[in-house]
Image (spheres, rainbow, N blue to C red):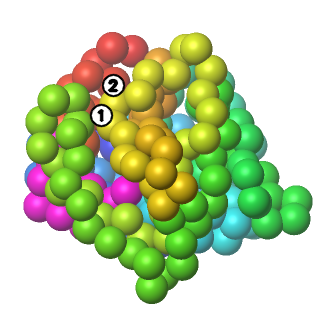
Amino acid sequence: MKVGVLALQGDFREHLAAAAQCGHDPIEVRRASELLSCDALILPGGESTTIAKLAKVFELFAPIQKEIAGGMPVYGSCAGMILLADRILDGAPGQETFGGINMSVRRNAFGLQVDSFESELNFLGTPLPAIFIRAPWVEQTGAEVITLSEVVGKDGQSHPVAVRQGALLATSFHPELTSDLQVHRYFFDEVCQAR
């Protein structure tokens, strides 16, 4: 499978490596023509407002929205989760997303950079190491959104940190920064194949 990784800002190199380790053909996406050659797309962690602005500069914003609406499998980690959300809480003024997942996410929900942490999650019944860096969490989802993993936040409430809606997968953590490929394999083997 040809897997595009949006390569405008953030930790796209780690996702390229993970896709290759899973046996797929990864390509850096910076142009609409590259996007259209892909079977699936990964939106990396980074800074969600910067990625959205650069996507407009590189004339990728509308094409990515069109591919999402057309059913292309897309996985977003951290900033990528924010970019796949239909609604953002505490977003920057005028912040836009590609949308696609019927959820509300809170940016930097776990705190600032100094509040970053590692944890072990239950991902579909299996232990999974997770790295949270200025991570969002999900505060509300529509009925069509499936929660795959949750964490208790500093507010004492349980919040989804991995969700799926159809061909779209999002995590608030960074599996690409660990050696565990569970999330990427789930995306390639379950989400992409279901299309």
- Which residue is depicted at the point 63% across and 33% down? 140
**Residue 177 location, quadrant:** bottom left
Q: Is residue 137 left or right of residue 119?
A: right
Image coordinates of residue 129 in percent, x first then y, are 18, 56
Image coordinates of residue 13 in percent, x first then y, are 32, 69
Residue 154 lies in the magenta stretch: no
Quadrant of the image containing the N terminus: top left
Q: Earlier in the sequence, mark 1 or mark 2?
A: 1
Residue 179 lies in the magenta stretch: yes
Task: Sort mark 2 into few (<14), some (14-19) or many (20+) by Cα contacts within 10 Å.
Answer: many
Q: Is residue 145 left or right of residue 42?
A: right
Image coordinates of residue 142 in percent, x first then y, are 62, 21
Quadrant of the image containing the C terminus: top left
Residue type highlighted by circle 1 = Phe
Q: Which residue is mark 2?
A: 192
Q: Which residue is mark 1?
A: 187
Q: Who is closer to the viewer here, 33 or 67?
A: 67
- Which residue is depicted at the point 67% across and 71% down? 50
Q: Secondary structure at mark 1?
A: helix
Q: Which residues are magenta?
A: 170-182
Image coordinates of residue 184 in percent, x first then y, are 24, 43
The reply to whether dot 1 and dot 2 touch (C-beta < 8 Å) is yes
